[in-house]
Image (cartoon, coloured by chain):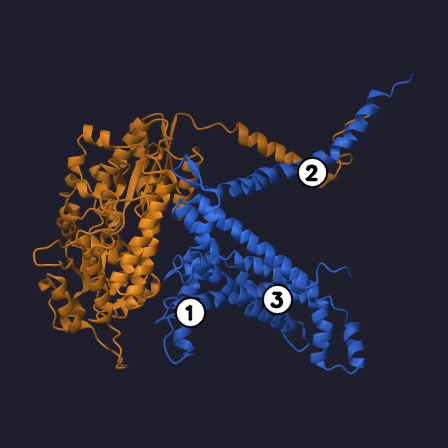
Chain colours: A orange, B blue
Amino acid sequence: MFHWRIDADSFPLGKGPMVMLFLFLISTIFIFARSEEGGEKLEFWIFANTHFEEYQARIPIFEAQNPGVNVQLINFGGTMHDKLLAAMLSNFGAPDLVEVEITSIGRFLKGAIDEVGFVDLRPRLESEGWMEKLVVSRFTPWSYRGRIYGIPHDLHPVVLLYRDDLFKAAGVEMNEVETWDDFIAAGKKATRDLDGDGTADRHAIVLDRRTESDYFPLLLQQGGGFFDEEGNVIIDSELAIETLEFFVSLFNEHEIATPVYGTWHGDPSNFAAMQDGKILSILAPDWYVGILKSQVPQMAGKWRAIPMPAWEPGGRRTTTRGGTMIGITTQCKNPERAWELLKFTYFDRGGLVNRYETTRIIPPLKSAWDAPIFKEPDLYLGGQPLGELFIEMAPDLPPRYQNPYWAEGADLLNDAIFAAVTEKQTPRQALTALAEKVRALIAKDQGRWGNM
Amino acid sequence: MKTKPRSYRFWNQQQKIAPYLFIAPFYLLFVLFMGYPLISSLVMSLYEMRGFQSRVFVGIGNFTDLFRDPIFWKSLWNTAYFAMGTLTLQLPIALLLAILLNSKFVKGKNVLRLAFFAPVLVAGVFVAIIFNLVYDQRAGLVNNELILFGREIGWLNEENYVMPAVILTGVWQWAGFNMIYFLAGLQGIRQELYEAAAVDGANWWQAFVHVTLPSLRPVIAFVFVVSMIGSLQLFDLPYILTNGGEPADAGSTIVMYLYKNGFQFMRLGYAATIGWVLFFIIAVISIVQLKLLGIFRDE
């Protein structure tokens, strides 16, 4: 007679596998029996560490104000956008609320308008009167085909951060610089060959020639862009070509610009070059000042800021670089509750003041700007009230129109800028070829599935 | 007629089923996590995503686009360049280190073995960040301490030097790891073979060529094939070292281009196509390598 005895000796593969099977069964039961925390759950994904600290401190207040609501804040870091893409493709597993970075949002806008995975927030913004309370141009990076998919987290106005001591030593008063022509003249006086080897090693400005991160903000300052509001490619416009010619001339003709030390503006070797007095100015958005403070605190007191030089007298003195939005996904079961959390994190004056304290980021909510903290002297800038300068710039921010083809376009734009600065192509050749490539890409897709 | 007892029948039945049940977990997982995605990605390569929920059949359109795509060819060239660097630089260095550590004259073998092996324990991301500083044009260790060519080389800023920088980093990270395989192989060679060679009057070079290398053939074949596959799948090191393949795609590799298309451009069909072309390249190269090294030969 067949007997099924369960003990270590009769188990087919011996003691070890039996213990493993036992543990497997126990853990399976544990996982499936684990009770969900009670109440309504709101999942909120973010990618920025600096935001995590802010929200972690403030979410308990929201939960206390909304009994029964349980907010799960998850910081995935840099891989968050890929996870979000997978969740939206599989139509399963996306959070209720999510923050998305400005260069990543384009890919989420591909396809038919109803397939976009974010809720259109325009009706809510308009009916509750929020549009007028925020900087309107800042909705452009998060809007497409008339819908608004996200609320701006920031403005990211750009100023010119410069070494007051070293420019003064060269006999230049930077407060008098108003236009880019003024800046070139000042830069020529301050750029130096310190070790006498025949090549300059102190440059008036550091610019990234590997990517679009400095050229594109300069183009936006001029009122240009890669795509216009209707989605047309305009990167081969005369404005874009002139801007690239100017960008290239700072390196090759005027010789006052140095490429970024290392691979980007946040590279440790770039910070080292700043400390060695090799870099005299930077085009700095608000968040970059925050990075400088944390990475090179020993440079406190050496920097000052002025509005960016204008293209012509009386022209726009700022631009914008970088950004984050918050959106509600179409997988969210209770968009009303998510909207409440969104407003709590993005439109609460107290919270926004706290955000500035920790990250130096100026909020897009105009009513928060009169808070005393923005007028406080900034010791890192020798007592200059930097917040006030950023807020002064904020109403003049240029629009930055979003497009599903931004990532492909930006990848090719990086190559075009490098080719122009290294003189492999003229700016006109580089941008004309780029525009043709992107137009061909869009035309091919439209040929496959029609205009959407 | 006497019927068989029920328990006997059960025993017979379960003996037939049991083997399948034992292998079932692997095959279930394989079908779910390998088989299904493989077939799905092959199907996907014939489509292009129109949006998040719909796609359009494009036939072999993705393949014809790919063969006309200059960035794909540049990525393929960069990847091949790295693979050649691995074969011609990294593996000979690994073999040389193994021979040194296997010789009687070297002291402190355990410490050296650990030292050469240690880089592989460092996560690729950290290696890339460290070497970013090492290769820095003006402040980096390489340019400051070793003025090799009489000028500051833009290791990560000049197109021609980006892949050599990636290859040298690969040597630093992986040579010690491959050294361990070669060392194990060397230690497995019977001493009598060398003694016999010495009796026949062979010098050290002849012993190396006629005893050591033939004896190491299976190990060399394994290391070559595995290193080649690893090289063709290169991604994280250049991605971080060159900040996404810049400048001018000089650091772009096939897998990096696949990632960009799939995740950054949301062109999943095109990314699947790149994946299958890469699979085909790896399969052909591996088979050719194994044939050349005589692994399919009956001994």
The residue that mark 3 highlights is B179
Amino acid type at image mark 1: Tyr
Q: Position of residue A138 (x, y in %)?
A: 21, 43
- Mark 1 or 2, nearer chain start: 2
Q: Kindly state the secondary structure of the residue where label 1 is placed.
A: helix
Image marks 2 and 3: residues in contact by CB distance under 8 Å: no
Q: Dividing the image into 4 quarters, which one contains the C terminus of chain B? A: bottom right
Q: Position of residue B238 (x, y in %)?
A: 44, 60
Q: CA distance from mark 2 to mark 3?
A: 36 Å
Whether discs 1 and 3 lie on one chain: the answer is: yes
Residue A104 in sight from this viewpoint: no
Which one is in front, A13 or A357?
A: A13
- Mark 1 or 3, nearer chain start: 1
Which one is in front, B203 or A242?
A: A242
- A410 left or right, relative to A242: right
Which disc, if any, is residue B23? 2
Q: Kindly state the secondary structure of the residue where label 3 is placed.
A: helix
The residue that mark 1 highlights is B161
Q: Position of residue B208 (x, y in %)?
A: 70, 75
Please name the residue shown 46% across and 54% down the image.
B67
Estimate how packed mark 2 is, as few (under 14), some (14 to 19) or many (20 or more) residues with alpha carbons within 10 Å: few
Q: CA distance from mark 1 to mark 3?
A: 26 Å
Q: Kindly state the secondary structure of the residue where label 2 is placed.
A: helix
Amino acid type at image mark 3: Met
Which one is in front, A175 or A16?
A: A175
Please name the residue shown 17% across and 48% down the image.
A397
Does residue A255 sit above or below B30 in this rendering? below
Estimate how packed mark 1 is, as few (under 14), some (14 to 19) or many (20 or more) residues with alpha carbons within 10 Å: some
Amino acid type at image mark 2: Ile
Between disc 1 and disc 2, the foreground one is 1
